Image (tube, rainbow, N blue to C red):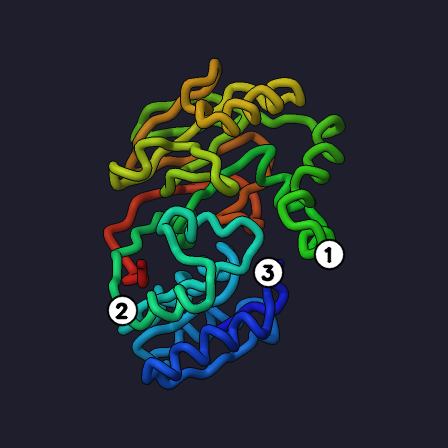
Amino acid sequence: MANPTSGGYKAEFLDSVRTRLEDLGFRTEIRLTRHAGEIGEVCANPGLGVRTLVVAGGDGSINEALTGFQNNPDPPQLAVIPIGTANVLALELGLPRKPLAIADMIWRQKTKSLRFGLANGHPFVLMASSGFDAEIVHAVPLALKRKLGKLAYVITAFRIGFKRKASHLEISLDGETINGKFAVASNARHYGGPFVICPHGATDPGLYMLVLDKDDPWSSLRYGLALMFGRIHKARGATVRPFSVATIASTSPVAAQVDGDPFGTTPLEIRQTEKTVPVLVP
């Protein structure tokens, strides 16, 4: 399945992958989504009848597939063609970007168990957060995102950053309470691209919470620079903790996001799950 609204969608790219797979003896079908949520609908269908479902899209498309799999008693294995804006999962898994290499990866059928967390019962494979980054995700115009990719988020951050009013968050981590302005639960090592938010994410399974004590424009700039240099977990005012169950609450609703897509507002309950999905890897 392919999301034709993803930033990197190119029909000829997918045709190259399909041609290579058919040369290797696979039967293939390309299905383009026609409405939001269609990937999830297809993945939830117990009569899907395929061994491998290939999703061409960004991290949001993968999240949609994962959500659908939760309602499928016998989901197929998942393969990813990264053509989205950030493609953080592809970075985490070291997935190839060239069509022949992608097809060869699918042909080899080597899988890895993809673990995920739950935010208010909804799966996330990368992160769930509340605060400034979620406000940006909610505010970025879709047309601008399609045209400029990651730059659209930077433009939106400057557009809203100097006029927004920060909200206080109360984060509970397995019973321990931490106060902050921004909180992100991470199931991955990277955040927003090649930026390392949780160095332990590559070696220690489980969820980690990053809490920042400030999110005013100058603090956000300081934390942004720390993120670019892979030192956000060591920055002054930053707290990183492993957890099994967490809640993010606030006195008034604060924007939330999951895997780079809007996800309503606080409160959030975030927890680990033992469920996994097989995903093809190099």
- Measure how far apart labels 2 and 3 are at the Cα level: 25 Å
Residue at position x 51%, y 79% in the image: 31
Which residue corresponds to the image point at 57% horizontal and 48% vertical from the top-left?
Answer: 264
Q: In which quadrant of the rendered image does the C terminus lie?
A: bottom left
Three-letter residue code for mark 2: Arg
- Are the residues flagged by discs 1 and 3 in contact, CB closer than 8 Å? no
* Dot 3 amino acid type: Gly
What is the crowding at mark 2: few (fewer than 14 residues within 10 Å), some, or many (at least 20)?
few
Horizontal and vertical percent for residue 218? 65, 18
Marks 2 and 3, the one that precedes in the sequence: 3
Give the mark nearer the N terminus: 1 vs 3: 3
Q: Position of residue 219 (x, y in %)?
A: 60, 19
Q: Give the residue drawn at x 39%, y 70%.
A: 103
**Secondary structure under the numbered disc 1 in the rendered image:** helix
Could you say which disc has been placed on residue 8 in the image?
3
In the image, is 199 to the left or to the right of 5? left
* Front position in the image: 125 or 131: 125
| Percent x, y of residue 40 | 46, 68
Is residue 135 depicted above or below 28 in this figure? above
Question: Distance from label 1 to label 3 (Cα)?
Answer: 14 Å
Q: Closer to the camera, 201 or 195? A: 195
Residue under the image location 26 percent in, 57 percent down: 112
Q: Which mark is residue 210?
A: none
Q: Amino acid at mark 1?
A: Ala
Say whether residue 97 is left or right of residue 199. right
Dot 1 corresponds to which residue? 143
- SS at circle 3: loop
- Residue annotated with mark 2: 108
Picture quarter containing residue 45?
A: bottom left
